[in-house]
């Protein structure tokens, strides 16, 4: 069985080779791989900080641009011919447990994103006891507060 080209095969070609006939010359299986990976191809290309703004603009029209035109748009001046490796940038993971974030969000009637910011602010300014008191205000006992503060039992 023939294995289709994968995401990084397409990205490597866009960054390195930039053959104008690339998409036209792909097998049916490889075209399907390209067609189904528009989002991930753009995400991988956006790891290059020099073109992240241009890639963000393309994201807005991603569902409206056919694959052949998307490829031509990318190699036509947006993505420079560049064989450097750009590491995949991962989102920052919250140091706080989900249960704590949910309690803060409920208490202040804010989003979980804002609650994460509150927790960060309170913990970095030495107000960790405020977070503990907030948990106690929800009726949690000392052991439960400790678990929530350490991020235990988030799967419940």
Image (cartoon, rainbow, N blue to C red):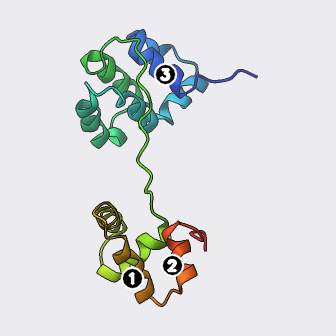
Q: Secondary structure at mark 3?
A: helix
Q: Is 1 placed above or below 135 here?
A: above
> How far apart are labels 2 and 3 at the CA level?
49 Å
- Mark 1 — residue? 133
Residue 16: image x %, image y %?
Answer: 41, 11
Query: Which quadrant does the C terminus fall into?
Result: bottom right
The residue sitting at 43% across, 31% down in the picture is 41
Residue 137: image x %, image y %?
Answer: 40, 88
- Mark 2 — residue? 145
- Mark 3 — residue? 10
Of tags 2 and 3, the one toward the viewer is 2
Marked residue nearer the N-terminal end (2 or 3): 3
Give whichever of 56, 135 is nearer the camera: 135
Of tags 3 and 1, the one toward the viewer is 1
**Circle 3 Cα neighbour tier, 10 Å, few/some/many (<14 / 14–19 / ≥20):** some
Marked residue nearer the N-terminal end (2 or 1): 1
């Amino acid at each position: 069985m023939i294995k289709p080209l994968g995401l990084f095969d397409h990205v490597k070609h866009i960054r390195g080779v930039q053959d104008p006939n690339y998409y036209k010359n792909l097998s049916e299986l490889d075209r399907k791989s390209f067609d189904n990976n528009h989002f991930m191809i753009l995400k991988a290309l956006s790891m290059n900080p020099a073109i992240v703004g241009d890639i963000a603009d393309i994201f807005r029209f991603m569902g409206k641009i056919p694959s052949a035109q998307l490829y031509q748009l990318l190699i036509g001046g947006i993505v420079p011919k560049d064989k450097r490796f750009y590491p995949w940038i991962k989102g920052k993971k919250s140091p706080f447990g989900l249960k704590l974030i949910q309690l803060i969000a409920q208490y202040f009637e804010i989003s979980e994103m804002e609650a994460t910011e509150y927790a960060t602010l309170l913990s970095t300014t030495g107000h960790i006891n405020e977070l503990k008191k907030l948990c106690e205000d929800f009726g949690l006992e000392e052991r439960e507060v400790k678990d929530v503060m350490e991020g235990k039992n988030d799967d419940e």
